[in-house]
Image (cartoon, coloured by chain):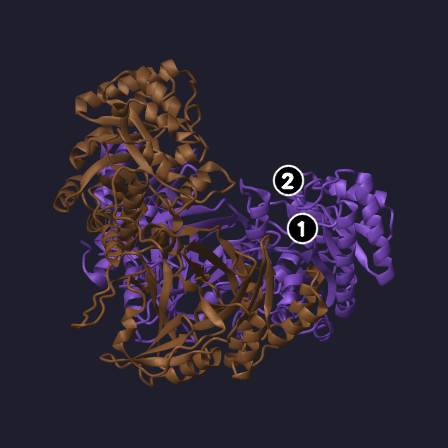
Chain colours: A brown, B purple
């Protein structure tokens, strides 16, 4: 499978874009004309640069508003096309993308359009060029791949074929199954783009919100599965406002991953199997205030299990089946941070193989003889993901201090990771492609400093990804206080809250108004509400069951981690997001109280 | 005129929102229920706080999915409503917003709906409450103000009236003229919101993109002009993702300004007249590198005109009719910055009166005896705007050094101000409301580090506002190199460029590829293109005429100001935006070359 990427997907100068595409493992690029126009490098220099980098210039694009016009304009358009062919010769590119006419078409007659394409074909023949005709979803007369294909067949020139773009086809809800019926030799080029579903006009949707395959809501695997006879490159063409601002190499690596994933899903090639039987094995924090973390873990009902024999700065804490590793950074006061997730899998070796094929960076570790090998990779946000295929054998490396005891805490329900701005799509694809997790629809939660975006993913383990608004003028709250968190399960949230409180835990205080509203919303017995109010428990309900939960305050004054304890009743499937706004407002107040005194 | 604002417009806690609304001069607020639910203050405390701040709680909102339902659900809904009336009693609020049913309505029968509203009215009577029924634009059965009014008339209860929301009416292109025909006593409440026109579903458009009156593309002045018999408050209800992140007081001041402007435009009250006969009188820079600025001004053809007699750090530079004031900050090397615009007006006193009424902050200045009074205000980005109503008399305060000479430069074409993220709408309304400038549609320009948004405004003077993406991972470019600029006119750009070059000016270098593309795009004689290429001139064309222009490099290594020289031919009306991407890519390269060496 040959992979290609349009330069418009990447930030920087044209030279920088080429370098990033090559470094990420692409074999080809589409040159977006504007990128060349603003470049100080001549077409010949760009050609040489691409060759040095091992890149083929697969396509020059876009050429617009050519066909379906009166004769005089058509002559002008042919001259325009010829100028581009001359430019492409200098560039060493053999194929041009011809978009169906949007602005200037006046003749809605396939015979005329085919005849004009045939003339373009003759010109292409003279320059040894190829023309890929693409139906834009908002083309004036030609806007379906069927229609563009029919015209190409009528044009009957070997230099004329179609370009298929997944966005233009799937955004209109056209059935891509028809692709399999086309003459594959007439499919000159394929562009792939996914997108979140939006109820808005196609042009604006396309120009700003495309994402890589697997990052949106269109069915790219199905689309690609109809391309088994196509032999050209799969090329990414993503118009996305965030991509334009993002680090180019990082974007390119994400794009390369998306192509490998979608080709595997579509059966075009084969990745090592995704790991099976996922479960949380451990979570790891590091802290420069181990006293405080120890206190909170103790208050939650954890006991210190032991110290690592060799790396004595690592402690292990246990509550029933839950294992938390704590790295003691020494007394520098740095707040606690979530650094690693251990995930039990059927085969750690298979997981690492797959990660490698997906271009995921591995964590370099050195085990000493007799120590268990736990291979690990970096998630896009830097969190280390360890694969464990032998249960908790690795605990044997720890000097035991206290034995694990039965606990009111029954497991790790989910982990919430804060994602950098711009990077939710990348993170989602990472967890989908590597671990096979499935994403739920995105939620937006109002906070006193802006909307927070939340994305849950499931597949054996539950994971939530949160993104805070980058540009908030109240950024101190969102940076410092929109923290990552761990959610532990219990079968008895009320008893658990009581025990925690008796051990002195600071439970996040929930306002009375919340309980008044709860009374108005649900037919809950008053004594229940009073218990919740007393213990600062929050309540949610879905069509299956109920969710009863409470939060610790953030670790430390401006800590970036906190813990949630949750009881799922009768198969409740959510994450208590109806209550997230209440939590965030409470966290905001705690931070303000610490940093500015009580707000007026 | 009473003004009010919904708490959902403002960031922070409910207490912080109230404080900001009061500080900005509002008389009332709408309490958005969620803001109360997450607040640690009881309804009684909020009531007291509002009273202390001189705020009336005009409305409690929203109450949803009440009417058009079967009897059993209706009974439940009445109980829900009663709980809210009890809450409102504690809050000291007398009116609730009832939105037309979106989710649960099953009975599409006005008689039934009116009957159910009548029952709600009876309940309201018992609690001494009022119900304002609002047709949401996406209401299931009721989605026009006419329909909601008809139902209210059928309900025939004195406690039931309508709430009119400009967004719900104008977004659907309903004609607001019908408002004038309604019984004004039955208009219980009016909410105002503007929005940019978007071709997307109404709900998403409404939830994320509303802006204050005058900041969008709906005709709010016309809407408000139909409310002459309405005696309640004009209340802002803006759902906007950026507002949620912005400083609350600043947002509130902006909102208060929008109401005063729209009421004046609609003829409901009267502001002092906007200043007339606008023209640029001067521009002012400050710099810690006066040597460099002097060099560039000299290369552009300016001559040092004199020093201020008292404030000797102020110099004046002149070229023909153009006056540039330069403040010398001493040899600290700080790059040049654009600090002030002098604008000739018919009445500086009138302008200041209007500014005061619009809540604009004045610049505190102290003139000594015999000095000309130039009153000034701060634009939202901190630029000082001076009003000059006696030509250049103020120049008499300067010791003359050299006389002004005729120049190839003929005037100030426009000034481009960089706006902070989030703040374009506020800036646009500022210049519209204070100076009567008219905004053109917004443009977006691709750069190597993200999209830049450009907004031009005209009305005697031309002004452009630019916003760079805040969250770019290549932020160093956008912060340092997306600068403000001055555009001077000339009648002969070619000769001007030659003169500047002969004086050693660093003209921004434009790539060859640009000129190749120009050849393909336009039928320009080759010798013209060659001259442009030689001099780094850029070319644009609109349906009226042509634009020939060139740029200086940024002042200093990472300067945040540069100069454009432009020749408008035959009434060209644009700003050369077709060439902005070329300029930005060139500026990006210059910065990279300075900071990182030549990119690979």
In terms of image quadrants, where is residue B217?
A: top right
Q: CA gap, disc 2 to disc 1?
A: 23 Å
Residue shown at 51% from the left, 75% from the top: A552
Height in image: B296 above or below B49?
above
Residue hosting label 2: B172
* Residue A599 found in image quarter: bottom right
The one nearer the camera, A90 or A110, is A110
Q: Residues within 10 Å of mark 2 (few under 14, many from 20)?
A: few
A307 lies above or below A130: below
Residue drawn 50% across the image and 49% down it: B457
Callout 1 secondary element: helix
Q: Secondary structure at mark 2?
A: loop
Residue B106: % across, % down: 72, 41
Please report, as a chain letter, where disc 2 is located. B
Residue linked to disc 1? B265
Choose between B447 and A333: the one closer to the eye.
Answer: A333
Asked whether residue B215 is in view, the answer is: no
Residues behind callouts 2 and 1 on a single chain: yes
């Amino acid at each position: 499978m040959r992979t290609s990427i349009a330069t418009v997907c990447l930030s920087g100068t044209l030279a920088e874009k080429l370098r990033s595409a090559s470094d990420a493992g692409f074999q080809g690029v589409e040159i977006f004309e504007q990128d060349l126009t603003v470049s100080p490098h001549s077409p010949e220099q760009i050609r040489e640069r691409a060759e040095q980098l091992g890149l083929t210039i697969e396509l020059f694009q876009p050429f617009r508003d050519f066909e379906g016009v009166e004769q005089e304009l058509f002559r002008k358009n042919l001259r325009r096309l010829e100028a581009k062919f001359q430019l492409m010769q200098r560039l060493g590119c053999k194929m041009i993308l011809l978009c169906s006419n949007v602005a200037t078409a006046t003749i809605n007659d396939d015979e005329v359009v085919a005849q004009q394409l045939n003339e373009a074909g003759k010109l292409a023949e003279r320059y040894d060029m190829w023309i890929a005709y693409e139906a834009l979803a908002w083309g004036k007369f030609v806007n379906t791949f069927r229609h563009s294909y029919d015209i190409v067949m009528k044009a009957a020139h070997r230099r004329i074929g179609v370009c298929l773009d997944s966005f233009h086809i799937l955004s209109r809800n056209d059935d891509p199954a028809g692709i399999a019926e086309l003459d594959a030799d007439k499919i000159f080029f394929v562009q792939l783009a996914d997108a979140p579903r939006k109820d808005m006009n196609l042009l604006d949707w396309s120009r700003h919100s495309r994402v890589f395959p697997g990052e949106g809501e269109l069915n790219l695997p199905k689309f690609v599965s109809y391309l088994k006879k196509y032999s050209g490159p799969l090329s990414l063409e993503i118009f996305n406002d965030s991509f334009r601002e993002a680090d180019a190499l990082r974007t390119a690596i994400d794009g390369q991953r998306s192509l490998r994933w979608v080709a595997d899903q579509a059966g075009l090639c084969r990745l090592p199997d995704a790991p099976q039987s996922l479960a949380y094995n451990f979570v790891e924090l590091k802290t420069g205030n181990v006293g405080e973390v120890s206190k909170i873990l103790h208050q939650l009902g954890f006991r210190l299990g032991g110290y690592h024999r060799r790396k004595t700065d690592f402690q292990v804490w246990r509550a029933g089946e839950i294992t938390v590793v704590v790295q003691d950074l020494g007394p520098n006061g740095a707040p606690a941070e979530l650094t690693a997730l251990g995930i039990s899998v059927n085969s750690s070796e298979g997981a690492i193989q797959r990660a490698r094929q997906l271009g995921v960076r591995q964590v370099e570790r050195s085990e000493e003889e007799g120590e268990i090998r736990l291979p690990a990779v970096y998630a896009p946000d830097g969190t280390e993901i360890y694969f464990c295929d032998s249960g908790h054998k690795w605990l044997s490396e720890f000097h035991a201090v206290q034995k694990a005891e039965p606990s009111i805490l029954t497991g790790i329900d989910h982990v919430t990771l804060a994602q950098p701005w711009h990077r939710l799509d990348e993170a989602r694809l990472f967890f989908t492609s590597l671990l096979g997790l499935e994403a739920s629809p995105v939620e937006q939660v109002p906070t006193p400093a802006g909307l927070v975006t939340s994305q849950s993913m499931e597949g054996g383990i539950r994971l939530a990804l949160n993104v805070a608004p980058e540009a908030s003028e109240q950024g101190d709250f969102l940076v410092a206080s929109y923290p990552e968190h761990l959610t532990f399960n219990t079968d008895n949230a009320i008893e658990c809250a009581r025990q925690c409180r008796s051990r002195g835990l600071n439970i996040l205080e929930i306002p009375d108004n919340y309980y008044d509203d709860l009374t108005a919303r649900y037919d809950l017995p008053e004594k229940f509400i009073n218990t919740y109010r007393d213990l600062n428990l929050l309540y949610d309900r879905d069509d299956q069951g109920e969710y009863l939960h409470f939060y610790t305050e953030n670790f430390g004054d401006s800590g970036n981690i906190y813990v949630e304890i949750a009881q799922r009743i009768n198969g409740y499937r959510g994450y208590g997001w109806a209550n997230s706004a209440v939590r965030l407002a409470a966290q905001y107040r705690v931070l303000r109280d610490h940093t500015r005194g009580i707000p007026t």
